[in-house]
Image: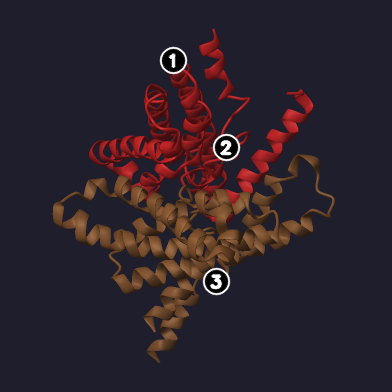
Chain colours: A brown, B red
Amino acid sequence: MEYVILIVSAVLIKNILLAEYLGCCPFLGTSKRMDTAIGMGLAVTFVLTIATAVTFWVQKLVLDPLGLGYLQTIGFILVIASLVQFVEMFLKKFVPPLYASLGIFLPLITTNCAVLGVAILCIRRDYTFGQSLLFAASSAIGFMLALILLAGIRERLLISAVPRALRGTAIGLIMAGLMALAFNGFVGVDSSLHALMQR
Amino acid sequence: MTLWREFRKGLWHDLPPFRLVLGLCPTLAVTKSAVSGLGMGLAVIFVLTCSNVLVSLLRRVIPRKVRIAGFIVIIATFVVVVELVTQAFFYPLYEKLGIFIPLIVVNCIILGRAEAFASRHGIAAAAADGLGIGVGFTLSLTVLGALRELIGAGTLFDHPVLPLIYQDRPFAMMIEAPGAFICLGVLLALMNAATATKGT
């Protein structure tokens, strides 16, 4: 049951984009069209989950025993960068259709702060391996949800009369703000779930 | 004189995050107050200037194929320096910025300047560019932080500014995530409008 709360919390309440501000650049960059939003969302889900699993063991098996905790930032980013490269080569060789749809987004993911951010958050919050995996996967799903919702809104905005100064990123940001306001409505769902569990 | 021009373009022509729409995560996350915006800005000035200089120095040494990985390692090194220094000497700021200090590594402004400018120019020009963009980023973050703090809490740099009656029931949404997005969107629109009337 606590896993359910973890999932609900990561997807809806503490959405990494709309509440934790992680991954905002691709959020605004790839939300202009629905198909790019879906591609980016899937690519992030894929990489974020694998990267968190790998960095968890890097921290527990390499950095912690050797007392190299201060190298966390540099170590994680290297692991993520090489992992992204590896995933790209693997997909290109063995799963060409998936590579064709995700390929152009993969290099961008290295500098997506959601990946590094979630990896570091898992360590800072002392999650177990299972919790880390679940947190990473549900954060990624929350990311994809927000991205696809915003893409839907922005496709509609293309055919509406927006004041010239607001066109493009400005109106996108304001829309994201209104979405964040809506997601704020989920605050408290986790405690009511908790209460439900107690009963 | 050209150095001055490289510096100045960061203050208006390429002002991040408004003209170069990069580095939005720290912009949105740490501008809950003017002080944390300023602190993040100063950290970025240091990392950006140092990494620009080092990338420019090594631009003939790093093979083109692995340049992005090389840039990231250079940037990460300076980020670790910032992380340790703030942890040792500015602990309250370290607490406030939290996870966003290590995340300076993936701030796309820094990698963007390394790739677009520092890897193609001399050391002096790269340093001027880094300083200019860094100062511009700091100014933007401080203004955004001040605005959100003023409306959201009625204070400015932690000093009470608005009357007490406002401070008791401020418009707290400005401090939260929705306020961050909307405030940045409105500032961006004002910036666009100013550009449209001014010409450049």
The span from disc 2 to disc 1 (Cα, nearest Å) is 24 Å
Q: Which mark is residue B156?
A: none
Q: Which of marks 1 and 3 is in front?
A: 1
Q: Which of the pair A59/A122 is nearer the observer?
A: A59
User: Which amino acid, mark 1?
Assistant: Ala
Residue at horizontal 59 percent and vertical 63 percent from the top = A146
Q: Quadrant of residue B83?
A: top left
Residue at horizontal 47 percent and vertical 66 percent from the top = A139
Q: Position of residue A115 (x, y in %)?
A: 43, 56
Q: What residue does disc 3 label?
A: A186
Q: Where is residue B148 in the image (x, y as percent from the top left)?
A: 55, 44
Mark 2: few/some/many CA within 10 Å (<14, 14-19, 20+): many
Secondary structure of residue under mark 2:
loop
Q: Quadrant of the N terminus of chain A?
A: bottom left
Tell me whether marks 1 and 3 sit on the same chain: no
Q: Residue B17 carries which label?
A: 2
| Side (left or right) of B137 relative to A59 | right
Q: Can residue B157 be seen in this view?
A: no
The span from disc 2 to disc 3 (Cα, nearest Å) is 30 Å
Q: Which of the pair B144/A32 is nearer the observer?
A: A32
Tell me whether marks 2 and 1 sit on the same chain: yes
Q: In this view, does B139 lie above or below B1?
A: below
Secondary structure of residue under mark 3:
loop
User: Which amino acid, mark 3?
Assistant: Phe
Q: What residue does disc 1 label?
A: B124
Q: Position of residue B198 (x, y in %)?
A: 76, 24
